[in-house]
């Protein structure tokens, strides 16, 4: 079956530091890959997505590239801000599958 | 529009009482609808999904149930709440044929 593994947190960074959150997956076929962000007390927001190999999703300074050869979709941001403090979830959805498979989530705290 | 309305936003209920969480969505017809739960400090668990009116699939056996009386309405219910039902409940949607799932703002349930 499908599964997503993402690096365990919590991750604590200083403002303007570089952020990487690793995500690897196991799936049949060619899934679509997603990163969601959950700010404190809120629901999940779609941060970015990629639907095929070598696609790069980007939004709000975050980027992730769909790497089929390494089955990875690592999230990166070059210079984080305090407002980026949140929980980040990696997820996948296989073609013809109705549901998302989520990673466990990574809590990121950015200090001023 | 991907608007998803969930209510109530916050709920405190005694053990053994009933539950009804409602979700309505706007936008295209025949969306796929989902209920997820997020327990404190844990990841996301898919509870139910629906591909059409009256069509409900349960992912996890428990004392919760779901119904879809109208195309854009999805209700999560329980006849008797347990302490372990406490958590953050998220309604979500994806458009028919689409691969992206969008989430509502969530409902906080505390069973006391």
Image (cartoon, coloured by chain):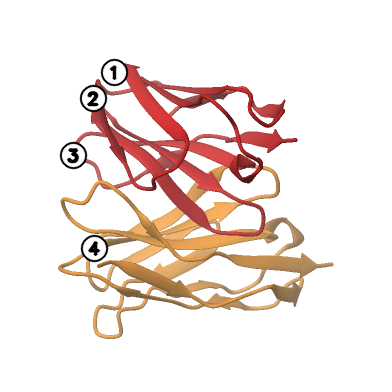
Chain colours: A orange, B red
User: Which residue is denoted by mark 1 in the rendering?
Assistant: B71
Nearer the camera: disc 1 or disc 4: 1
- Comparing A81 with A85, the one in front is A85
Percent from the top left, x then y, of residue A37? Answer: 55, 54
Label 4 marks a residue whose chain is A
Residue A73, picture quadrant: bottom left
Q: Give SS at disc 3.
A: loop
Q: Give SS at disc 4.
A: loop
User: Which residue is denoted by mark 2 in the rendering?
Assistant: B30
- Residue under the point 62% across and 22% down: B8
Disc number for residue A31: 4
Left or right, residue B31 beside residue B18 = left
Percent from the top left, x then y, of residue B80? Answer: 57, 28
**Res B1 visible:** no
Tag 2 near tag 1, CB within 8 Å: yes
Q: Give SS at disc 2.
A: loop
Whether B78 is drawn above or below A33: the answer is above
Q: Which is more N-terminal, label 1 or label 3?
A: 1
Mark 3 is surrounded, within 10 Å at the Cα level, by few (under 14), some (14 to 19) or many (20 or more) other residues, namely few
Label 3 marks a residue whose chain is B
| Distance from Cα at disc 2 to Cα at disc 1 | 6 Å
Mark 1 is surrounded, within 10 Å at the Cα level, by few (under 14), some (14 to 19) or many (20 or more) other residues, namely some
User: Which residue is denoted by mark 3 in the rendering?
Assistant: B97
- Comparing B86 with A21, the one in front is B86
Q: Give SS at disc 1.
A: loop
| Distance from Cα at disc 1 to Cα at disc 4 | 27 Å
């Amino acid at each position: 079956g499908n599964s997503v593994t993402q690096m365990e947190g919590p991750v604590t960074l200083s403002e303007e530091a570089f952020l990487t959150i690793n995500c690897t997956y196991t799936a049949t076929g060619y899934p679509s890959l997603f990163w969601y962000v959950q700010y404190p007390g809120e629901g999940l927001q779609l941060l970015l997505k990629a639907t095929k190999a070598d696609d790069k999703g980007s939004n709000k300074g975050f980027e992730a590239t769909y790497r089929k050869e390494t089955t990875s979709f690592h999230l990166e941001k070059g210079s984080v801000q305090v407002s980026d403090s949140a929980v980040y979830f990696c997820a996948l959805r296989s073609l013809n599958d109705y549901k998302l498979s989520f990673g466990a989530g990574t809590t990121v705290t950015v200090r001023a | 529009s991907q608007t998803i309305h969930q209510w109530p936003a916050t709920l405190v209920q005694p053990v053994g009482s009933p539950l009804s969480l409602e979700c309505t969505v706007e936008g295209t017809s025949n969306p796929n609808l989902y209920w997820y739960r997020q327990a404190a400090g844990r990841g996301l668990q898919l509870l139910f999904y629906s591909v059409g009116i009256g069509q409900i699939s349960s992912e996890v056996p428990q004392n919760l149930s779901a119904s879809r009386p109208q195309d854009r309405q999805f209700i999560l219910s329980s006849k008797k709440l347990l302490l372990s039902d406490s958590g953050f409940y998220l309604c979500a949607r994806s458009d028919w044929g689409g691969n992206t799932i969008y989430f509502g703002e969530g409902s906080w349930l505390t069973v006391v």
